[in-house]
Image (spheres, rainbow, N blue to C red):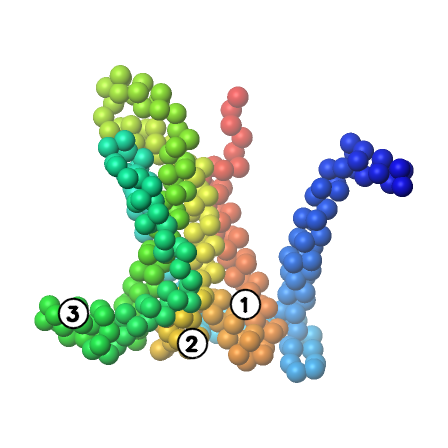
Amino acid sequence: MKKIQAFLFSQKIAPYVFVLPFIISLAFFWIYPMISTISMSFHKIGNGYSEFIGLANYEKLLGDGVFHTAVKNSVIYTILTLVILIPIPMLCAFLLNSKSVLGKRVYKSILYLPALVSVVVAGILFRYMFSEMDSGLMNQILNFFGFESQEWLKNWGTGMFVLLLLATWRWTGVNTLYFEAGLSSIDEVLYESAKVDGANAWQRFWYITLPLLKPTRIYVTTISIYAGLAMFLESFMIYGSNNSPKNIGLTIVGYLYRRGIEKNDLGYASAVGLVLLIVALSISMVYLLSSGMFKKEDK
C-alpha cells in the first residue's frame, strides 16, 4: 500500500494521475465517437446490416441539392450572426464600462436574462409571435399600422430574420459580458495617458480598446462561428419540426438529424457530420491564422 501511495504521489506520476479523468473522458466521448463516425461514413447502414461502400456517401453529397441548401442556410446564418453579435455586444460593453452609466448591474442582469430562457421555450414563443395568422403578435402590430399580415415563416428572408432575431435576443447579453470582462482588464492608466497626450474618445477606442480587446474578440468570434454552424434546435422549435417550407430553415445539423434519425441512414448522416466538422474547423483555423493568433510575439 505504501508503495502504491508513493507511486501515485511521486512528482513524476502525480500530474498524469490528475489529468487521467480528462484523458479518459476525451477518449470515451470524443476520440472513440470520431473514429466510429469516420468508419460509418464509408458504410451503408440499415436495420441489422452494414455494407462497405467506400466514398459513395461523399459522392452523393456532391449532388445532393438539399444538403447544399442546408449548407447555404447555415453559412449565411453564421455570417449574419457574426455581423450582429460582435459589434453590438462590443458597443453595449463599452457603454456599460463607462463611468457615466448608473445601475450597471441592473443592465447586465437584463441583458443576460434571455440566455437563461430555454431554447425550447424561446422557440415556441417566437413561433407564436411570428404566426402567419392575424392573431400573431407581429401581424397585429403590422395591422395596427395599416400593413397586411405576413407569412413570416414561409418566406426565406423573413424566416431568416426570425432566426437572427432569436439569436440576437438570446446571445447579445452573453457576448456583452465577455467584452465587458475584456474591457475591465484594460489598465485605466493607458486611457489617462492618452488623454494627457490629447487623444479624443474615438482615438482612445481605436488605438487602445480595440487592440487590447483582440483576445476577447477572437474568442467570441470563434465560439460564434461554431454556434452558427451548429444551430439546429432554434430552427426546429420555431418551425415546429425539422421540415420547414421549401427547407428555408434547414441547417447542416438539421439535415444530419433528418438523415440519421428520421430516415435511419446513419452512414450518410456520418458523412454529413464529418463535412460539418471539416467546414467548422477550416473556417475557425483560417480565422485564427489570419488574426495572428499563432504568431509568436517578439520579445
What residue is drawn where x is 43% and y is 45%? 220
**How far apart are the alpha carbons under marks 3 and 2?**
26 Å
Q: Is residue 3 left or right of residue 269?
A: right
Instruction: Name the residue type under label 1.
Output: Val
Give the distance between the C-alpha atoms of the residues marked 3 and 1, in whole angstroms: 40 Å
Image quadrant in which the N terminus is located = top right
Residue at the disc numbered 2: 241
Q: Is residue 36 left or right of residue 137?
A: right
With 60 as the anchor, is 242 left or right in this view? Answer: left
Mark in the foreground, 1 or 2 = 2
Label 3, residues with CA under 10 Å away: few <14, some 14-19, many ≥20: some
Task: State the residue position of label 1.
Answer: 272
Kindly indicate the quadrant of the structure image that contains residue 248: bottom left
Of residue 33 and residue 76, the one placed in the foreground of this image is 33
The first of marks 1 and 2 along the sequence is 2
Q: Which residue is mark 3?
A: 142
- Callout 3 secondary element: helix
